[in-house]
Image (cartoon, rainbow, N blue to C red):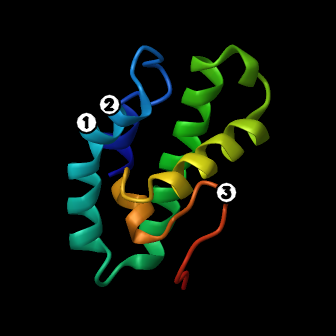
Amino acid sequence: MGRVLRSWHLANRSDKTLADRARMFSNVVQGWINYYGRFYQSQLYPLLRRINDYLVRWACRKFKRLRRREKKARELLAASARRYPDLFAHLRFGVKPDGWTMGAV
């Protein structure tokens, strides 16, 4: 799963919006959550946190005001996650971009 996640190059496509990214990758991530989330949650949470890290890098590259400000980018993604909690599959699962995980093991 990590290899597939790296092959998507989430942080490099700054021409896409957050909603475009959600449409492109949420189905695959939802499948991982459905399959591995039942019995291997301890292995799934670090992967889902890495998706948040890639999204933070994407925000830093997309918005000039966020360059070299990862904390601000994380806050921006957390605010958008609060506004649109169903945007990404891993947000519905409970892995939030501000580092807080609901139902963590």
* 43 relative to 56 in the view: left or right: left
Of callouts 1 and 3, the N-terminal one:
1
- Label 2 near label 1: C-beta < 8 Å? yes
CA gap, disc 2 and disc 3: 21 Å
Vertical arrangement, residue 54 with respect to residue 1, above or below: above
Name the amino acid, label 3. Answer: Asp
Q: Dot 1 corresponds to which residue?
A: 24
* 62 relative to 40 in the view: left or right: right
Residue drawn at (41%, 77%) of the image? 41
Q: Dot 2 corresponds to which residue?
A: 20
Residue drawn at (46%, 58%) of the image? 48
Quick one: which residue is furthest to the front in this view?
A: 83
Q: Nearer the viewer, residue 84 or 43?
A: 84
Vertical arrangement, residue 38 with respect to residue 85, above or below: below
Identify the element where label 2 is drawn: helix
Q: Dot 3 corresponds to which residue?
A: 98
Identify the element where label 3 is drawn: loop
Of callouts 2 and 3, the N-terminal one:
2
CA gap, disc 1 and disc 3: 22 Å
Classed neighbour count for the residue bearing mark 2: other residues with Cα under 10 Å, few (<14), some (14–19), many (≥20): few
* 98 relative to 103 in the view: left or right: right
Classed neighbour count for the residue bearing mark 3: other residues with Cα under 10 Å, few (<14), some (14–19), many (≥20): some
Residue drawn at (74%, 19%) of the image? 65
Classed neighbour count for the residue bearing mark 1: other residues with Cα under 10 Å, few (<14), some (14–19), many (≥20): few
Vertical arrangement, residue 105 with respect to residue 59, above or below: below
Q: Nearer the viewer, residue 7 or 25?
A: 25
Name the amino acid, label 2. Answer: Asp
Name the amino acid, label 1. Answer: Met
